Image: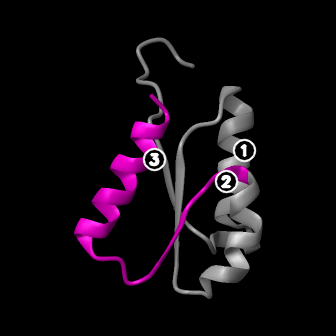
Amino acid sequence: MRQGARPLDVVLTDFRLDAGETGIQAIQAVRAGLGRAVPALIVSAEGRDSIRVLADPLGVPVLEKPVAEDRLRTALRTILAEDL
C-alpha cells in the first residue's frame, strides 16, 4: 500500500465490467493484490442464480438491480460487520 493511502474497506462492483471482465475477476485481483479477503458485494441486472455459482465460493453476496438504497446499505453493513 502506498504511504498515506487509506486501507480498502469494501469492494462494490457490478458483475459485467469493461473489456469482458467481471466483478468476480475484479474482486479476486483486489484480494490477491492486498493479500487479504476484502469484503465484497456484487450488484447485477443479470440473473442472480448464475452469478451466485461464481460468487458463493468467494463469500460474496449478490444483489439484483435495481437495488433500493436501504437494501444496499443493509448489505454493506452486514458484510463489513462480518469482517470484524
Residue 74 at what x, y percent from top left? 31, 58
**Is residue 24 on the magenta stretch?**
no
Residue occupied by mark 3: 79
Q: Check disc 1 and give the amino acid type.
A: Ala
Residue occupied by mark 2: 26
At 34% from the left and 48% from the top, the residue drawn is 77
Residue 54 at what x, y percent from top left? 76, 66
At 28% from the left and 76% from the top, the residue drawn is 68
Crowd class of label 3 (few under 14; some 14 to 19; many from 20; radius 10 Å): some
Residue 60 at what x, y percent from top left? 61, 56
Q: Residue furthest top?
A: 3
Asked whether the residues under the numbered discs 1 and 2 touch, taking CB atoms below 8 Å apart as contact, a structural biologist would say: yes
Q: Check disc 3 and give the amino acid type.
A: Ile
Q: Judge whether 25 appears above or below 31 on screen.
A: below
Query: Which residues fall within the magenta stretch?
Result: 58-84
At 44% from the left and 28% from the top, the residue drawn is 84
Marks 3/1: CA–CA distance: 19 Å
Asked whether the residues under the numbered discs 3 and 1 touch, taking CB atoms below 8 Å apart as contact, a structural biologist would say: no
Q: Quadrant of the N terminus?
A: top right
At 23% from the left and 67% from the top, the residue drawn is 70
Disc on res. 78? none
User: From the viewer's perspective, is the residue at label 3 or at label 2 nearer?
Assistant: 3
Marks 1/2: CA–CA distance: 5 Å
Q: Secondary structure at mark 2?
A: helix
Residue occupied by mark 1: 29
Q: Is residue 8 left or right of residue 53?
A: left
Q: Nearer the viewer, residue 7 or 46?
A: 46
Q: Secondary structure at mark 1?
A: helix
Residue 65 at what x, y percent from top left? 43, 82
